[in-house]
Image (tube, helix red, strand yellow):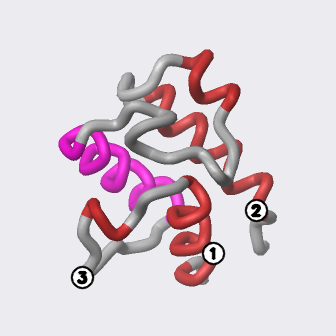
Amino acid sequence: MQLTRAEILERLKEILISSDAVPPEICDACNEDSDLFTDIGLSSIGMLYVVIAIEEAFHVRFTGMGVSDFRTVRDVINHIEEHLS
């Protein structure tokens, strides 16, 4: 079953909250245009933990990608969509 962008966003918000990297009130307000670092407040290390959680939750890999390759939530959703089986 293919997930919609909205479903991916909701799962991504859950991951951000459960990773303790981002407070729930910030996640509730985030959208595809939210900047991962300035709007959401992720650090480089926080982003690494989130990437690992995303890989596990969506069964996708970020092979050959760096933290700086993703700037917005949209970038992450696009990557997940491209690699969902």
Quadrant (top left/top right/bottom left/bottom right) for the N terminus: bottom right
Image quarter of residue 4: bottom right
**Disc 3 target residue:** 64
The residue under label 1 is 81
Q: Is residue 47 on the magenta stretch?
A: yes
Residue at horizontal 24%, vertical 69%?
66
Asked if residue 44 lies left or right of residue 17, the reply is: left
For badge 1, the amino acid type reads Glu
Position in image of residue 52 (x %, y %): 31, 53
**For the residue labelled by badge 2, is the local secondary structure a helix, a strand or a loop?**
helix
Position of the C terminus, as image quadrant, is bottom right
- Residue 48 on image: x %, y %: 25, 50
Estimate the spatial distance between the alpha carbons at disc 1 and disc 3, rounded to whole Å: 17 Å
Residue bearing mark 2 = 5
For this view, does 76 lie left or right of residue 56? right
Estimate the spatial distance between the alpha carbons at disc 2 and disc 1, rounded to whole Å: 8 Å
Which circle's residue, 3 or 2, is located before the other in the chain?
2
Q: Residue 84: give x, y in percent of width and height.
A: 59, 77
How crowded pointer 1 is (Cα within 10 Å; few <14, some 14-19, many 20+) is rated as: some
> With 42 as the anchor, is 74 left or right in this view?
right
